[in-house]
Amino acid sequence: MFADQLGPHFLDEPGQPVLLVESKAVFRRRAFHRQKAHLVLSALRHRAAELKDQAHLVRAETYAEAVRATDSPLSVCHPTSRGARDLVRRLGVEVLAPRGFATSPQDFTAWAASRRGLRMEDFYRDARRRHGILMEGAEPAGGSWNLDADNREPPPRGARHLDVPDPPAITEDEIDHGVREDLDRWQRDDGIEFIGRDGPRMFPATRREALARLRHFVTHRLPIFGPYEDAMLAGDPLMAHSLLSAPLNLGLLDPLEVVERAEAAYRSGAAPLNSVEGFVRQIIGWRDFVWHLYWHFEPGYHRSNKLGATTPLPKWFAELDADAVEARCLSDVLAGVRDRGWVHHIPRLMVLGNYAMQRGWRPGAMADWFHRAFVDGYEWVMTANVVGMSQYADGGRMSTKPYAGGGSYVNRMSDYCGGCRYDPKVRVGEKACPFTAGYWAFLERNEAALSGNHRMGQPLRGLHRLTDLDALVEQEKARGSRAP
Ligand code: FAD
Ligand code: SF4
């Protein structure tokens, strides 16, 4: 089992022998967030401890070394990256069908073959029908497939924190202490580098912890997940999100068991349909969709760069130096990544991704950064989310228009702007909001590439009405890669 295949559903029989590999080379190749390295090692070692004599945990420099040293024939569930799949094939390991996703490759291929454009909404409806999730016969529960219109509320006026309990803190144990000592030693003696700050483990490393988080979420947080799904509050980074991406991606939870519990909350009247539908859409819609796109798109997809964005990531961003940033939204979100290795979807898309796309930073470098800096980051999930959705580097193969937005979006959906030295309405000058100015500079720079997109017609007409465009473009050139 790879370290993202840790749940019971990755075993054929509960008692079968298991080889687990802890490879140090993985950490030499890339500077991961310290808390991500901790989480993955902790989860792997906890699983080995649970399986007792049934598991053989090999600490080796590389996977190949560990596999070659094993006499018995091996099989593994389909790995989650091309690199890992090719490696196990080369080593003669039998590759079984993938697990840990709701839709099989065959069902995805059959679905994709029958259409020209691949849209998540169609895929999601198909998945709902196939699994009978939130269905009344052939119709969607409540009569509507999509309750997104109810799920775009700004944060409640004047609130500093949503009225929901935070997930209960995780208690670290001896295994965590051992992981922390090892990582300290690797850093000190082996020259292995990490980014971000260490901190108490925030995410489940065992199935028991993952199930406890799932239960707590469904009971206490799911009911108001929906309306505030897109909202941000400076004092409440978690909002009502589930924080389940890390245990799902480690394989500790199966997506279908997660959505079935959410559906049960709707059926029993404990959670409203808009919240439950919104949550189910994220899991058997978005999560499965980006997984299949990773394999469906050609291997070179991750190098797509349709907008010709070639600027390297500046050091302050790459190294999570939130204190160098005055723009309140960006500083707070970057601090969240530095301190937790996690922020929710909208800060990822509309703050971090949006800022990078506006400045023309290299999409591939952004994908690599997200992969390393987030506790839930894996190659399969990065490619479509970062290269496609957040950077529009594929020219629209997975979204109908770039997710570019100015300060007015951040102002509407958060409480950041009130306490910021910039003003979301100002485009030019001392108080010019870097998101607002960056939005128009992005449109100006990419007008030719975007003019064929009918959804960009209105913004591009707005661009031509700006009387201060020349000054704005000069200002943004002068800002360059400096921290805003
Ligand atoms: P919730 O808001 O509670 O959503 C429930 C679950 O839905 C998540 O746990 C996750 O499993 C799934 N989900 C929702 N949206 C997506 C999506 N677009 N792709 C895949 N799964 C989704 N998700 C990751 O798991 N790993 C990543 O590295 C990652 N990087 C992202 C980078 C960018 C630029 C963007 C825009 C999105 C990224 N996402 C990623 C998707 C999403 O932001 C996170 O899954 C989510 O914020 C995790 O927090 P949560 O568990 O509280 O999610
Ligand atoms: Fe962010 Fe601009 Fe609002 Fe400041 S004014 S918080 S930079 S959007």
Image: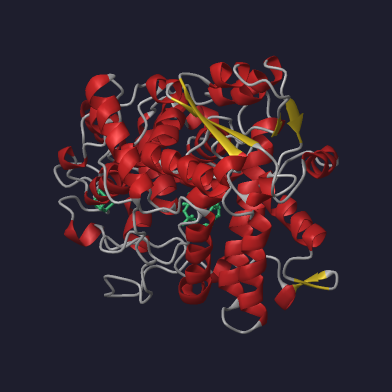
Q: Return the residue nearer the eye: 47 or 343.
A: 47
Kindly indicate the quadrant of the structure image that contains residue 18: top right
Relative to 464, is 3 on the left or the right? right
The front one of 467 and 450 is 450
> Which quarter of the figure is the C terminus placed in?
top left
Closest to the observer: 369 or 475? 369
The answer to whether one can see residue 274 in this image is yes
Q: Quadrant of residue 472?
A: top left
Which of the image's four quarters has the N terminus?
Answer: top right
Identify the residue at horizontal 25%, vertical 32% (top origin).
Answer: 184
Does 306 sit left or right of 77 as displayed?
left
Picture coordinates of residue 351 (x, y %)?
36, 46
Where's residue 59, x and y in %? 46, 26
| Vertical position of residue 180 compared to residue 395: above or below | below
- Residue drawn at (64%, 33%), measured in percent from left and top? 294
Identified at 43% across, 38% down, the residue is 41
Q: Position of residue 397 (x, y in %)?
A: 64, 35
Compared with residue 442, is residue 15 higher up or lower down, i.e. above or below?
Answer: below
The residue sitting at 34% across, 55% down in the picture is 410
Does residue 464 appear anywhere in the picture? no
Instruction: Tell me which colouring the rendered structure shows.
Output: secondary structure
Q: Is residue 371 left or right of residue 185?
A: right
The x, y position of residue 376, in whole percent, is 47, 44
In front here: 10 or 291?
10
Q: Residue furthest bottom?
A: 269
**212 relative to 328 in the view: left or right:** right
